[in-house]
Amino acid sequence: MILTEDVVFNALKRTWQPVANSESLEAGKVMGYTLLETELVIARFANGAVLAADVACPHKGARLSAGCIRDGELMCPYHGWRFDEKGACQSIPSLLEPNPDKQALSHLKTYATQERYGFIWVKLDPSLPANGEAHELPDIPEFEDARWTYRMGPPMKFQAGWRREVENYLDMSHFAFAHSSTLGVSADPRIRDMTITVQDDGGYQMDAPFPALDNNHEMPGKLQSAHHRRQRSYLPNFTTIRQSFHDGDERVLVHIPSPNTRESCTCFWSLAISPGFRGPAPESQIEFAVKVLDEDRQMCELQMPREVPINPTRGGWGVLVMPGDTLANTFQKQLRRWLSASVETKVTPN
Ligand code: FES
Ligand SMILES: [Fe+2]
């Protein structure tokens, strides 16, 4: 099947995608975010409710992301029109008398939101894919277990398509090169004992031993030691890495490249650390991960074209070697299956 980038974005519009870390949007804050080429205003009201709506004001199109919360309502910076948490227009200051008809016409186009795992998620399109199953977030119990320690990573923008980023996150053969200044020059570039299994939900899982690393410049300590790595990917772009160390300690990372445009994405990520973890403090683990992720950003931004082709001809995904590129291939194959299923028919719920 020939797929297009429109098909990709339309399918992703029916999935939950992160747009902000919850903690960065305190009550009274208004921000902008471009999700799948849709420019949004995201605002949190005094009662904690989050509004996600098209950014253009219904009056003259000013970006509401430049507005503010005034007396409990979202106010446009241009002529002061105000909207409540559901997007209903509550006042048009230039009118001598309220005009309910004009206000009704001025309702913002809003989108479903939810907060989970420390992120604000938006679903742009409520219609269902051909299989009739609404996209839901996977359950990651470690992130909802009070005994574990959580830390949110700062979102990082990549000038590269979201599939480039997914591939990078799955890539086991770049550590010794792209991360030589953080993870260590002695990282073994050879891939061994990698097991990939396709899951019932269409996602896939990779299990592999991760070798001990050695680096004189960085001292992540425990994080350099040999461990077992389990990577679980949920389509289309939600990945977790579970690192199990020999002493029983564990870390789980959640990682989602939220597509901004066809050639840029923002990585949202967070970390769950098992109870009594013997190793660096959570803050220094985040600090170290930021350095590693920034190296990944540089590699993704070096790649041509900026997005992985969705219809590879022979060699269209590049010159591949096994087993290093097997996981990226699994991603592309499973993604194509998922996309093909999503375009068969479109069912709109009543
Ligand atoms: S453009 Fe928003 S109130 Fe006029
Ligand atoms: Fe990397």
Image (tube, grey):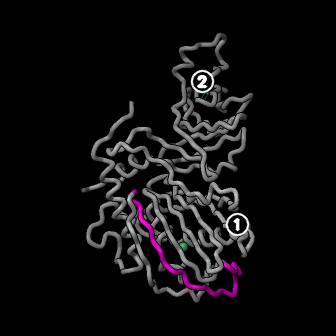
**Does ligand 1 reach within 8 Å of label 2's beta carbon?**
no
Asked if the stretch drawn in magenta spans residue 211, the answer is yes
Whole-percent x, y for residue 184 in the image? 61, 84
Asked if the stretch drawn in magenta spans residue 139, the answer is no
Single out the residue that lies furthest toward the top: 97
- Quadrant for residue 95, please give it: top right
Q: Nearer the viewer, mark 1 or mark 2?
A: 1
**Does ligand 2 reach within 8 Å of label 1's beta carbon?**
no
| Amino acid at dot 2 | Cys
Residue depicted at 51% across the width and 81% down the height: 209
| SS at mark 1 in the image | loop
The vertical placement of 227 against 111, above or below, is below
Residue position marked by numbered label 1 in the rendering: 275
Residue position marked by numbered label 2 in the rendering: 89
Residue depicted at 63% across the width and 27% down the height: 83
Among the two numbered marks 1 and 2 on one chain, the one whose residue lies closer to the N terminus: 2
Whole-percent x, y for residue 181 in the image? 62, 81
Whether residue 68 can be seen here = no
Q: Is residue 320 left or right of residue 297?
A: left
Quadrant field for ligand 2: bottom right
Whole-percent x, y for residue 131 in the image? 33, 45
The vertical placement of 107 against 196, above or below, is above
Range of the magenta residues? Answer: 201-222
